[in-house]
Image (cartoon, helix red, strand yellow):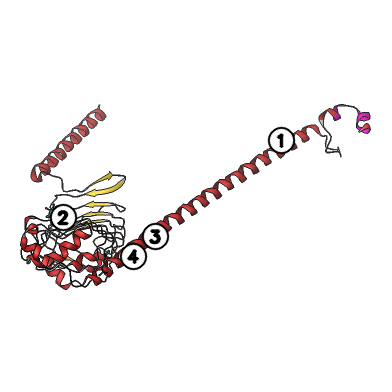
Amino acid sequence: MYRIRGSLALAIVCFSCAVAEGMTQLDGLTDQNKPKRCSHERVYDMSGAYCVGLRLQHIPSLKSGIEILDFSENRLQELKADTFSSYTSIKFLYLAENQMYNIDKDAFAPLSYLQTLDLSNNVILNLPESIFQLPSLRKLYLKDNPLLHLSFTNLQLHTPIKAPLELLDISNCKIDKLPYWGTLPHLTHYNISYNLLTALEAKHFASMCKLEKVDLTKSLDKIKLCDLKPTINWLQDKNVYFQLDDYSKLNTKEFEKCDDMPQNFVALNITHHVCKTAYLEFQSIKTSRRTWLTVTGGLAGFLVGFMLLLYLMHRHNVAQTKTKAEKLKKATPAHDRDKQATVPILVNDSNDVSRL
Ligand SMILES: *[C@@H]1O[C@H](CO)[C@@H](O)[C@H](O)[C@H]1NC(C)=O
Ligand SMILES: *[C@@H]1O[C@H](CO)[C@@H](O)[C@H](O)[C@H]1NC(C)=O
């Protein structure tokens, strides 16, 4: 009787505990609408952490081994040297729409697998040079950073840069003079729109020999029409698609009358040639590495197969000798000297044996 009453009391206590906990959880939800926790998901067979729009000021502790980190729309202000030191496998890093102004020069150094970096819509003051040396970085978004032009004036680039950049977006960053990136043999998409440029030199594009598309929307209004002609000619000659907000001025008499040839055509050709050579070198390294991998992979597969075959043959032999031995053991008396003796022979009498 006592025990029943006791367990009933316990059940009531537990029930009220659960209700209370549920209430506090509900309170939490009504307070902020969203949970302040990053979620972990697998996307495209990669491990990702999603922390979008959580108003976080710091990157919380996440699973190590994540390959995607989406930390867009938060309140991150700084990236320190050790911010990513526990997440060295990150390939895709999204930090757009934070309040970032300071990035430590070594912040991205541990990220040797980083392929895509989105730093759009921040207030970056000091862009570290090391970003351009990331060995796997293919896409870099820096758009909508109104202070970025200040860091470009101090940027000391070690050229040629290591990052195999394919896409570079520096649109809407109040840039008046484009930084010279050196040879960018993989760049196909370049967005420099919404910057009030004071010059657009053909030299800048000659070092981008795989360029397919450049967005120049709202960036050329300060430049004299005739000063544009050499670059426009160069882009047309190399079949680069350039996007403008107003193409009509290229069809005017005034544009037609401008001087045609850029003064330094030889130098441009050399720059372009250097870029093409770098591209071909990279491709040949890639294919030779692939061939090497295929060859060694094939060889390893063959060896494993061969060893398996040897092992199976060995097993087979052992089994055969065993059964033979067993048969002999069963058939041959212990004192028999003649190992060749077989069952029928032994079944017969000693006369038969002597006859053999
Ligand atoms: C270039 O950037 C501008 C502004 O950020 C954007 O509107 C435009 O779509 C981009 N162009 C391309 C080709 O992606
Ligand atoms: C530059 O290269 C182009 C072909 O890519 C060639 O037609 C042109 O004559 C060269 N110009 C000079 C000055 O070497």
Amino acid tagged 3: Ser
Q: For marks 3 and 2, give the CA distance.
A: 35 Å
What is the three-letter code of the residue carrying label 4? Thr
Give the image quarter of residue 149.
bottom left
Badge 1 vs badge 4, beta-carbon distance below 8 Å: no
Mark 2 CB near ligand 1 (8 Å cut): no
Q: Residue beneath label 1, please? A: 323
Of circles 4 and 2, the one toward us is: 4
**Considering the numbered disc 2 on the image, is that residue within a helix, a strand or a loop?**
loop
Residue appearing at x 26%, y 57% in the figure: 138
Magenta span has 210? no
Closer to the camera in the image, 64 or 9: 64
Q: Dot 2 corresponds to which residue?
A: 96
Residue position for label 3: 284
Whole-number angstrom distance, CA of label 2 to CA of label 1: 73 Å
- The residue shown at (19%, 50%) is 51
- Residue 185 in the image: x percent, y percent? 28, 62
Q: Is residue 181 above or below residue 215?
A: below
First of labels 1, 3 by sequence position = 3
> Mark 3 falls on what kind of element?
helix
